[in-house]
Image (tube, rainbow, N blue to C red):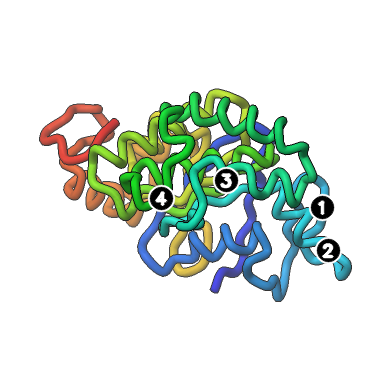
Amino acid sequence: MIRGVSLKVDKGQVVALCGPSGSGKSTLLRCINRLEDIQEGEITVDGISLKQKKLNLRELRAKIGIVFQQFNLYPHMTVLQNITLAPIHVKHIPKDIAIIRAKELLDRIGMPEKIYAYPSELSGGQIQRVAIAREMAMDPVVMLFDEPTSNLDPELTAEVLAVVDDLTHTGMTIVIVTHEINFAQKSADLIAFMDKGEISFLAPPEIFFSSQVPQRIQEFVGMLERKSGRRINNKKVEQSSEIL
């Protein structure tokens, strides 16, 4: 459950959500995409109130891309079919145009040769990159990422984060739940710390990873530094167990 959350994400901003497990990060993303019902408060996406009674969820979700921790490609469809399915059947984009867009996206994520491959023929990192391309094919106004690298080893994590980082330079609005603190420091405009269902601190990376933050956050960042083998404040690499 989340409560008392107040967060404004401007167009083109990249916001990283971090915090301990069970703090409400994933729930917040699911509320933004209306995968969770909203009991109180207000969420507005691209001028659309998510609490309106006649909300068209299909139309809303066409505007909001979301990539989960789990790999959610259709196993019986090729990469091309996975990417073009929603644009053709939800947005009614002509098939030939959808295919052209899919090929452009596959080039962008560095996987043009996998266009006719099935998910079972891909690595976990490749599957997540295709999942990102599938969401981007809908031309969303915002992309949500729920720890997209949590099930990947360091090398595959680097592949996926490189694609997300590329998106940050396109003007795409992004909200990402992540414990990849080096990525957050490099790519986020703002970092929000969630604890017990609330956003307890919000700041740009240069503040978030400094001694100016509350002790609770310093302890959390220190824990992540020890886990990753990297020190953030002075950017000194002590032992590399993750990428970026």
Measure the C-alpha gap from mark 3 to mark 1.
Answer: 30 Å
Q: CA distance from mark 2 to mark 1?
A: 9 Å
Looking at the image, the residue that sits furthest to the right is 54
Sequence-first disc among 4 and 2? 2
Question: In the picture, residue 162 is in which quadrant?
Answer: top left
Indicate which label's residue lies in the foreground, 1 or 4. 4
Label 3 crowding class (10 Å Cα cut-off): few <14, some 14-19, many 20+? many
Q: Quadrant of residue 42?
A: bottom right
Give the labeled residue for mark 3: 81
Where disc 1 sits, the SS reads strand
Residue 78 relative to residue 228: left or right? right
Identified at 36% across, 61% down, the residue is 20
Image check: 139 left or right of 13?
Answer: right
Q: Earlier in the sequence, mark 1 or mark 4?
A: 1
Task: Look at 67% across and 49% down and name the residue there.
Answer: 86
Q: Residues within 10 Å of mark 4 (few under 14, many from 20)?
A: many
Q: Is residue 191 above or below residue 120?
A: above
Q: Which residue is mark 4?
A: 119
Q: Are marks 2 and 1 in contact (CB under 8 Å)?
A: yes
Q: Earlier in the sequence, mark 3 or mark 1?
A: 1
**Which amino acid type corresponds to the residue marked 1 in the rendered image?**
Ile
Q: Of callouts 3 and 2, which one flags the residue occurring earlier in the amino acid sequence?
A: 2
Where residue 140 appears, x then y in whole percent? 68, 41
Q: Which amino acid is tagged 4?
A: Pro
Give the alpha-carbon distance from disc 4 to disc 3, as whole Å. Answer: 11 Å
Q: Amino acid at mark 3?
A: Gln
